Amino acid sequence: MSTTADQQAAHASEHELRRAVGRRPWLLAWLALVPLVIVRAGVLSEGDTFWEIRIGLLTMAHHAIPATDTFSWTMHGKPYTQNSWGFDVLAAIAYRLAGLPGAAVLCALITLGMIALVLALARTLGATATASAIMVFLASPLLIAWLTARPQLVDYTAVPALIVLLRGIERERHRWAPVVLIGLLTVVWINLHSAALLAVAIAGASAAVMFVLARRDSRWCYAVAATAAAAAGCLANPYGIGVLHQAGQVQASSAGVITEWAPFDLASPTEDLMMAAGLAALIIAWRRREAVLLAALVVCMAGSVEAIRFLPFVVILAIPVLAAFVSVPPDPVRRYLISRRPMFQQCGALGMAAIVVLSAPSLTHIGRPDPSTYPAALVADIPHGCRLFTTDLIGSYVILARPDVLVSLDTRNNLYGAALLVAEERVLHGLGNLSRGLAGAGCVLVPRSYGLAARLRHDAQWRVRAASQLAVLYVRR
């Protein structure tokens, strides 16, 4: 009896050792990508970050989500639906703990979670850790501009998590457990960001593809149940079904005005590369009969045709599929790679060392507002309580840095609407009747390159209060 118990214990210990050894390359692959995240966290460039923190602070202070605008003088008191209240509160908590660096670290951790899920998905598809890490690294130039500190990071993390759960249904493992978990995932997701509606589309498309590929199999029925669970989860938010109206309002206010809502542009090399990666992954997923990944890629690629904000999802989904594909090269290629393994290892080590060296300076300014966009010193010099006319990015920063100053504009485009955004853009470029365009404003803060900065230089109604190489602050005489 004792010998048998010892043998069982030895086998269990050996099994755990193998699992630990098997996980080690994936841990190293994940750690190798940390420097890229550090570089991104070094600078805050997205305007949304700042007003989202302010809304989170107000939500915690009043124990209620703000229902009207209190940050601008152009839309003051207008009803406003906040589509990322949960993320705002998390960002505000991080800001209270450690200021803007704390918010940047929070977003870096979410990004690292996304990378971990992408690597996990690649592993389930049969990819090697090395191929997966290389694929993420190669895709990083296409994704880096999108990985800013805002709630879209939650979307980029939730989508691969959703795919992992849907593949649990596809692979016939504990079918009801993924259905329940998808419902819970959607509840959390919709309260962090209303883009969780994407889960319903992906789950529904997965059910349709499963039905087409194997209609006699019952898996598609569970995928339908997962779609229903995702839809029910989307309703578990403070606005209920009103989240649908809010999503439509954002799209209507942004189309034709905001870059990320622009349709796919064949003339853009970056967009072409992102779509090409998706198309290659789509073909591979079809050949492998990967119903869930096939459906998700179709949904995101179709969405990208209408709005390029879906392109990051295409790349994120393509990474594990392409990594799995290159992990099984033809025999001649495999023999060549084996014969040159020492060279590749040395080049990889040198490349990793270079990335670490390049990312190290970012550690000294984690969470710094982009100095090429936000004139922090001039914002501090705005007279108390002055009504400020400014750009959407600067206005967003002012909302956090100077809550006593009301702005004309910020990046909440669904609050202002397309008409006001276009009208203010004309004024910022120095076009039209400035007396009418600046009516109600007591201060103007604009980059030097804008036409408005040049016109006010010769306007007797305005004088320069402060200036920098980046921008000029005017006050009304």
Image: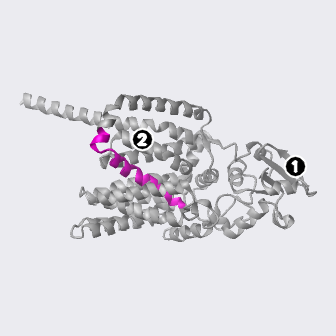
> Where does the image place residue 254, in percent across and percent down from the top left?
61, 65
Label 2 crowd (10 A; few <14 / some 14-19 / many >=20): some
Nearest-to-viewer mark from 2 and 1: 2
Label 1 crowd (10 A; few <14 / some 14-19 / many >=20): some
- The image's colour scheme reads one colour
415 horizontally vs 91: left or right: right
Which of 266/125 is in front? 266
With respect to residue 17, does 149 lie above or below?
below
Which residue shows up at 74% across the image and 45% down it? 375
Is 306 covered by the magenta stretch?
A: no
Q: Tell me the quarter of the picture where residue 200 sits.
A: bottom left
Which residue shows up at 16% across the image and 33% down it? 11
With respect to residue 113, does 168 lie above or below?
below
Q: Which element type, helix, strand or loop, lies under badge 2?
A: helix
Residue type beneath disc 2:
Ile
Judged by its main secondary structure, the magenta piece is helix
* Residue wearing tag 1: 464
Q: Which residues are magenta?
A: 308-334
> Where does the image place residue 244, in percent across and percent down from the top left?
51, 70
Residue type beneath disc 1:
Val
Report the number of numbered marks: 2
304 horizontally vs 427: left or right: left
396 horizontally vs 459: left or right: left
Label 2 to label 1, Cα distance in Å?
51 Å
